[in-house]
């Protein structure tokens, strides 16, 4: 059982090419009661989508914008119903990701409270 006040109900896939980003985003979500899995590239995302794993939220934080766009497009082409949150330091990447099917984006740097607000808007926490 998690050491916080949240019930573990939701599953999140965290896609980031840098290990420190995957660990950071997974830790943030775990503090909100999520069970998390990490992927570092589109091949690992494909393996996750083809498995029996179902995710409620997918967080995409890639340093190359084209990779972010490929992953968002692949998630939607596969019919993945998860909410997709892109983490980026570029307003243009955030907007283009939404046009490709992402549900929202967080602009880097962001606070823990900003992430919590996105999770509230998606209906994951109260």
Image (spheres, grey):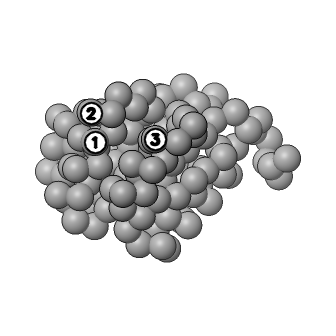
Mark 3 to mark 2: distance in Å? Answer: 13 Å
Residue in view at x 24 percent, y 40 percent: 73
| Residue 30 or residue 47, whichever sits in front | 47
68, above or below 22, in the image: above
Residue in view at x 49 percent, y 38 percent: 57
The label shown at residue 77 is 2
Label 2 CA crowd tier, 10 Å (few <14, some 14–19, many 20+): few
Residue 9 horizontal side relative to residue 26, left or right: right
Q: Earlier in the sequence, mark 3 or mark 2?
A: 3
Give the residue number, with chain letter if any, for mark 3.
Answer: 50
Give the secondary structure at mark 1: helix
Label 1 CA crowd tier, 10 Å (few <14, some 14–19, many 20+): some
Label 3 CA crowd tier, 10 Å (few <14, some 14–19, many 20+): few
Residue 47 placement (x, y as % from top left): 45, 50
11, above or below 68, in the image: above
Residue 121 placement (x, y as % from top left): 47, 28
Mark 1 to mark 2: distance in Å? Answer: 5 Å
Residue 100 horizontal side relative to residue 57, left or right: left
79, above or below 118, in the image: above
Give the residue number, with chain letter if any, for mark 1.
Answer: 74
Residue in view at x 35 percent, y 28 percent: 79
């Amino acid at each position: 059982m998690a050491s916080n006040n949240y019930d573990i109900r939701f599953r999140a896939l965290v896609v980031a090419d840098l290990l420190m980003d995957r660990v950071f985003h997974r830790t943030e979500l775990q503090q909100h009661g999520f069970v998390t899995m990490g992927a570092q590239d589109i091949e690992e995302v494909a393996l996750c989508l083809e498995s029996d794993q179902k995710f409620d939220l997918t967080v995409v934080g890639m340093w190359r914008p084209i990779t972010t766009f490929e992953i968002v497009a692949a998630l939607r082409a596969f019919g993945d119903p998860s909410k997709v949150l892109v983490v980026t330091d570029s307003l243009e990447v955030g907007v283009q990701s939404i046009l490709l099917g992402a549900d929202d984006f967080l602009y880097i740097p962001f606070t823990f409270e900003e992430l919590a607000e996105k999770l509230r808007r998606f209906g994951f926490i109260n």
